[in-house]
Amino acid sequence: MPVQTSIQLFTVREALEADLDRTLAELASRGFTAAEPYDFVRRAETLATSLKTNGIAAPTGHAFLASTSFVNPDGSGTSVPVPSPAAVFDAAGVLGMTTVIDPYTEPSRWQSIEQIAEIARSLNIAAEIGAERGIRVGYHNHAHRRSRSRSRVTSRASPTWPATSRAAGTSTDLRAELHPVSGRARRLRPTVRRG
C-alpha cells in the first residue's frame, strides 16, 4: 500500500478560514494529496469541491462525537453546540471520509470511571451510526489531558487500545477490543485496577 502524507487542516486554520481555495491550492503545490479537515459539517459541499479541484483527498476528519458542545483546543468547554453524530457522518460521506476522529473531550470528564464509561458509551453509539455508513470512529488523545489533569490517555501497537485514567491508587483503562480479522473495534469497556 502506498504511503499517503496528510496534513491536518487545523494546522493552517487561519489561512483556510481567510481563503479556502487558495490555501488548498498552496497545500497541493507543496505535494499534499490528502488532508484531515476539522469543522467540516458546516461546509462539507464547499470543502469537497475545493479539495477535489486541488486533487486532495480527505480520508479522515476531526469532529466531536462524544461531546454535545464544542471543546476548545486547550481543553476548556463551551456551551456552543456541536452537530449530531448523524450530521457528522452525513458530511463525512460527502467528503469521502472513511474515518472520523473525535479530537478530544474536556479533561474534567476523565475524573471517574463513570465519566470514562459515558465517553465510551457515546463513542460506541457514534461508531454504530458510522458503521451504517461505512465510516469508522477514532479517538484522538490531546496532550492537555496529560498535562492538565491526573488523567492520561495512551496508545500502543497491541490488540487493545487503552485509555488510562489514574486517580487515588487506581487506574481505569478504557479498552477497545479489536476484531482479530477485520481490525475493527468491537466495544470500549472501562475496567478498574487497584494499586
Image (tube, rainbow, N blue to C red):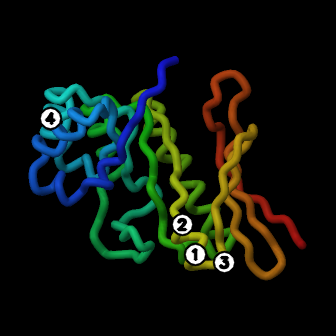
Mark number displayed over residue 67: none
* Residue contact between numbered discs 1 and 2, judged by CB atoms under 8 Å: yes
x and y percent of residue 38 in the render?
A: 31, 51
Q: Amino acid at mark 3?
A: Arg
* Residue contact between numbered discs 4 and 3, judged by CB atoms under 8 Å: no
The quarter of the picture where residue 186 lies is: top right
Q: Earlier in the sequence, mark 4 or mark 2?
A: 4
| Residue at the disc numbered 4 | 50
The quarter of the picture where residue 99 lies is: top left
Q: Nearer the viewer, residue 154 or 65?
A: 154
Q: Amino acid at mark 1?
A: Ser
Query: What distance separates the C-alpha of mark 1 from that of mark 4?
Result: 37 Å
Mark number displayed over residue 147: 1
Mark number displayed over residue 150: 3
How many neighbours does mark 4 have within 10 angstroms: few (below 14), some (14-19), or many (20 or more)? some
How many neighbours does mark 2 have within 10 angstroms: few (below 14), some (14-19), or many (20 or more)? some
In the rendered image of this protein, does residue 157 appear above or below residue 166? above
Query: What distance separates the C-alpha of mark 4 from that of mark 2?
Result: 31 Å
Q: Residue at x 69, y 68 (%)?
A: 165
Query: What distance separates the C-alpha of mark 4 from that of mark 3?
Result: 42 Å
x and y percent of residue 117 in the render?
A: 64, 61
Q: Residue at x 29, y 65 (%)?
A: 81
Q: Nearer the viewer, mark 3 or mark 1?
A: 1
Q: Residue at x 73, y 43 (%)?
A: 160
In the rendered image of this protein, does residue 118 appear above or below residue 22? below
| Residue at the disc numbered 2 | 143
Q: Amino acid at mark 2?
A: Ala
User: Horizontal placement of 142 versus 162: left or right?
Assistant: left
* Element assignment for label 1: helix
